[in-house]
Image (tube, rainbow, N blue to C red):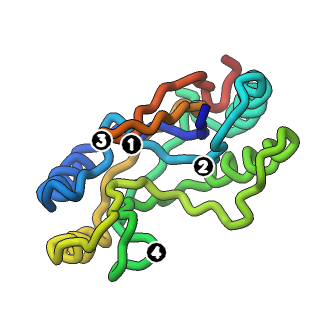
Amino acid sequence: MRTFIAVRIEPTFELRRLHSKLAFLGDRFRPVALANLHLTLKFLGETPLDQVSEIGSIIRQVAQNQPAGSAHSIHVQLAGVGAFPHERRPSVVWVGFQQADALCQMATELDRDLTALGFAPEGKRFQPHLTMLRIKSRPPEALFAILEEEAQTDFGMIEIAHVELIESELTPRGSRYTTLAKYSIGSED
């Protein structure tokens, strides 16, 4: 099975507004479904079923070690829109994160701790971003206008309370995500 570790992102009003703008780019450009919005902390890829329990133990430990507020959650700011690899040749349109030190710390710890189970380290610094749109062909000019208009937009503060181990199934209609396990941030489950 194909898996990754992520935090789900509940769409704010401003994220929904951006999603609607991206949906008007045409049939060839479908934004990520609002129900599938997430920040990947570590992509695992093909994962043996017999490692799921060990992976879960590592995720639980990393999530519990995070300083959380009284509600056992962390808060991060969503701000700005950009594109990878470059705004003139985008393949991914993303929303950025600010005040995301705890998320970066979790990603770093997961990357380090999962090497003991044979998962290769990322080899590059974690850059938190929320994928909104994947582009496989030449984008319309309207996309460049959106990138410019939304470059500094404040998409709101969000609360993150859980880290999830998620199975990803590739289907003709897009990826289907199934949560295999969920771990609370800053507390014992």
Which residue appears at 15% of the width and 61% of the height?
A: 25
Amino acid, disc 1: Leu
Residue assigned mark 2: 103
Cα separation, mark 3 vs mark 4, equals: 22 Å
Discs 3/1, front? 3
Pointer 2 local density, CA inside 10 Å: few below 14, some 14–19, many at least 20 = many
Instruction: Return the x and y of residue 101 as percentages of the image width and height.
Output: 61, 55
Please state which of residues 46 and 146 is positioned toward the viewer in this rendering. 46
Asked whether disc 3 touches disc 1, contact meaning CB atoms under 8 Å apart, the reply is: yes
Amino acid, disc 2: Leu
Numbered disc 1: secondary structure: loop
Residue assigned mark 4: 85
Amino acid, disc 4: Pro
Numbered disc 3: secondary structure: loop
Mark 4 and mark 1 lie on one chain; the one further toward the N terminus is 1
Instruction: Return the x and y of residue 81 as percentages of the image width and height.
Output: 34, 66
Indicate left or right for 79 with 73 as reference.
left
Mark 2 and mark 1 lie on one chain; the one further toward the N terminus is 1
Residue assigned mark 1: 37
Indicate left or right for 16 with 65 as reference.
left
Q: In this view, does 90 lie above or below 108?
A: below
Amino acid, disc 3: Ala
Please state which of residues 31 and 150 is positioned toward the viewer in this rendering. 31
Mark 3 and mark 4 lie on one chain; the one further toward the N terminus is 3
Discs 4/1, front? 4
Indicate left or right for 5 with 96 as reference.
right
Cα separation, mark 4 vs mark 1, equals: 20 Å
